[in-house]
Image: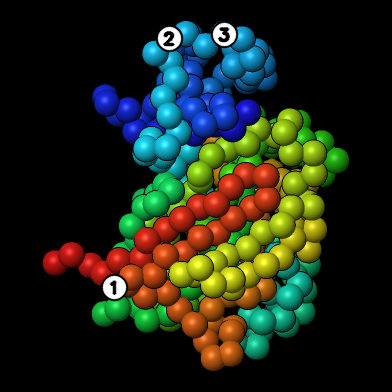
Amino acid sequence: MKLVTYAGAAGPRLGAILGESVVDLAALGLPDSMLALIEGGPALWARAKAALSGPIPDGARRPLAGTALLAPLPRTPKGVIGIGLNYAKHVDESARTMQTDATLPTHPVIFIKPNTCIVGPDAEVVCDEAQTRQMDWEAELAVVIGARCKHVREEDWREVVFGYTVVNDISARDLRHGGQWTFAKGQDGYAPMGPCIVTADEIADPHSLAIGTRVNGVEKQNGNTAQMIFKTGALIAHLTSGITLEPGDVIATGTPDGVGISRTPPEFMKPGDVCEVWVEGIGTLRTFIVAPRR
C-alpha cells in the first residue's frame, strides 16, 4: 500500500493512493490517522489491504491531483531519529569539509530531530539568512517502525518495520555548536517527510534503492541505499539495545555523498530555491525554501 495523510475539509485524513486517486480509508471502516493504523498491527494492515482490493464506495475516492498531501506522520512518538555518517563517501566528504572523523564509524551516529521539524510535501521551509547562510540538503530513506520493541536481533528487523518514506534531513552547517548537531538539524521545518509511506511488503529490499537530490532541477546527490554502512537491521538492533521503539517511530537512515557544503565550491539553499529529494519506489518530496515573513 501507498499510504498518505491529506488535508480534508475537517482536518487531516488517512488515505491510500490507488492509481490517480486517493481513497479515504475511514470511509472503508478503517482508522482516520496513520498512527492509529500503524498501532493497529498486522491484522488491521491486512484488512486495509483487502479493503483496497475490493469495490470502493461512492464518495470515498478523490483525485490525487489537487489533493494537498501532509507529512504521512505529522507527529511521531520521538520526532525523527537521525543517523549520521552512514555512507562511506559521505564520511569522506564530511571529514574534508566539516572536521568530522575520517574513519568509518564503529557504531551508528544518532541524533534526534524534534516533531516541530516535520512538514509535508510542497511545504515552505524558512531560511533565515540572519541566522544561517549554510542551509544544506540530505536525501534519506526513512524506516517507519510498526511495533513496540526492545532488544531486536539484527536478523529479525523485518518483524518490526511497517514501511518506508522519504526525509530531507535539512541541516544548517554553521549552527553546529560544541560538536552537537541537534540545534543545526532541529530547526522548525527541517524534516520534510513524504510524499507517502510505502508498506514493507511492497519493497523487497530497502538496501537496493536509488536515492538523490535535485535543487532547482539540477542533480546534487545520486546514490543507492546499498551504500549504507549500517543497514536497517543493524540500526534497529543498536537502537533497541537501549531505547524502546514504538509504532510510528521514524528512523532517517543517513545520506549519500553530494551534500552542499562538500561541493566545490560549497553550495547552500537560499530563499527562492526548490529542493527535491527522492527514493526509488517511494517518490519525490519537494520543498520550497522561503525567506522569513516579518
Q: Nearer the viewer, residue 227 or 124?
A: 124
44 or 148, which lies in front?
44
Q: Nearer the viewer, residue 78 or 220?
A: 220
Lower position in the chain sequence, tag 3 or tag 1:
3
Q: Is residue 21 left or right of residue 197?
A: left
Amino acid type, mark 1: Asp
Q: Nearer the viewer, mark 2 or mark 1?
A: 2
- The N terminus: image quadrant: top right
Q: Which residue is mark 2?
A: 58
Residue 27 position, x and y percent, is: 43, 12
Image height check: is 177 above or below 84?
below
Q: CA distance from mark 3 to mark 1?
A: 49 Å
Residue bearing mark 1: 128
Quadrant assignment for the C terminus: bottom left
Residue pictured at 63% horizontal, 75% vertical:
258
Tell me the amino acid under the disc marked 2.
Answer: Asp
Q: Which residue is tagged 3?
A: 55
Image coords of residue 210 (percent x, y): 71, 57
Q: Secondary structure at mark 1?
A: loop
State which quadrant residue 272 falls in: bottom left
Whether label 3 touches label 2, CB < 8 Å:
no
Q: Is residue 208 left or right of residue 215?
A: right
